Amino acid sequence: AAAASGTAGIRPRGVLGKLPRYAAGKPPVVVEGLESFKLSSNENPLPPLPAVLAAIASETAINRYPDPMTTALRTELAGYLGVPATDIVTGAGSLGALNQILATFAGQNDFDAPDEVIYAWRSFEAYPISVGLAGATGVQVPVREDGTHDLDAMVAAITDRTRVIMLCTPNNPTGPILTRDDVVRFLTGVPPHVVVVIDEAYQEFVRRPDAVDGIALYREHANVIVLRTFSKAHGLAGLRVGYSVSQPALTEHLRVSAVPFAVSQVAEHAAVTSLRHIEEVEARVQSIVDERDRVVEGLRDLGWRVPEAEGNFVWLALGEHTQDFAAKAAERALSVRAFGSEGVRVSIGEGAANTRFLELCGEYTHRP
Ligand code: PMP
């Protein structure tokens, strides 16, 4: 059939056959008589701010291309973060920004063997795909039993082929943060030519005062790039807006590899408007944090062992019971994210969703 349709000679790059498939969060499960809840993609369960919806509706000149420099958004972000606008590079989600970073700093250009990118595992499931597509080799360093990065092992994994190291804090899916002290000490062990990406997709949900804040750090560290997103705290996952922050010596290169017009004007206007209503955003984030703390305390009261949860999700290291637990959740119209036979990640959702999740955990006997 391939020959008949004339595609016999078309072959994708070899690396494609080796990449894991990105499994997007399961859609809501329908169960008769029960409201369905999607707790599988770490989304914000709250509806968009009215002002954001109005901003989206006001964008009518969509026959025109957006501002390729996203000047309005970078200016607004600069004020919010207290950094120069020149240090900010926007992208289609933080994943778009990350792909740009990898395309810029890691690939097959400089050595006979591919460049290496070190990251913790398990961590965000898009990393292996993005690294592989960039042409680099991923080097996975197992997280510790408590779900934290093993930073000493990550330093030990550095070779003369290492180009980029990814840190994820709070780590998706296990939950814990990295402290500022941890990261500063880690950076002393990293050669200055190795780029360190700190993925802070869930930074706004962090409440530990000693957690690293990449924005407070990158100006003293020329090799650090901070990744942030509007998908989680701002609840704009469907619009795809994220950004990286780093010193101009790095942003200069990132602008060369930028996907032109990656952020639409609709998305840009929505993100700017969300920043201008930051008190409302922060109040919503706090309500999610309160729910997270209720869920974690509830689980621990039930005797569950739960790692630190500083994002908008909790990690249940259910091992061989992972798929069974996810199936039981689905019976109650809760879609959760099951990872092989490692564990289940459950996003913090609506109050009723979290309560139903806790009820399930109260009845489930195989507890981590
Ligand atoms: N980084 C981490 C750690 C994530 O969990 C996610 C989303 N699940 C992303 C990046 C990508 O988010 P987005 O592209 O929507 O900004």
Image (spheres, rainbow, N blue to C red):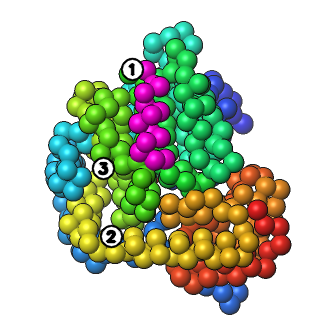
Say whether disc 1 or disc 3 marks the residue closer to the N-terminus.
1
Q: Main secondary structure of the magenta part?
A: helix
The residue sitting at 22% across, 31% down in the picture is: 248
x and y, in percent, of residue 172 in the image:
55, 52
Quadrant of the rendered image containing residue 333:
bottom right
Q: Amino acid at mark 2?
A: Glu
Q: Is residue 357 visible?
A: no
Which residue carries the number 2 mark? 282
Q: Identify the amino acid type marked 3.
A: Val
User: Does residue 147 lie above or below 309 as drawn?
Assistant: above
Q: Secondary structure at mark 1?
A: loop
Up-down: is 134 above or below 29? above
Task: Indicate the quadrant containing the C terminus: top left, top right, bottom left or bottom right.
Answer: bottom right
Numbered disc in front, either 2 or 3: 2
- Describe the element under mark 3 as helix, strand or loop: loop
Q: Quadrant of residue 185?
A: top left
Q: Measuring 72% from the left and 76% from the top, which residue is drawn there?
A: 302
Closer to the chain start, of discs 2 and 3, is: 3
Tell me if residue 183 is in the magenta stretch.
yes
Describe residue 8's horizontal placement relative to residue 67 as left or right: right
Where is mark 1, residue-wise?
193
Q: Residue at x 28, y 78 (%)?
A: 50
Give x and y (percent) for residue 212. Answer: 40, 48
| Residue 83 shown in magenta | no
Q: Could you say where residue 356 lies in the image, as x and y percent from the top left?
A: 65, 82
- Quadrant of image for the N terminus: top right
Q: Please say if 277 is above or below 109.
A: below
Of all residues shown, which one is farthest toward the bottom?
33
Q: What's the distance in space between the residues labelled 2 and 1, CA to CA? A: 36 Å
The percent position of residue 219, horizontal first and vertical second, equals 26, 36
Reading the image, the residue beneath label 3 is 263
Mark 1 residue crowding within 10 angstroms, few (<14) / some (14–19) / many (20+):
few
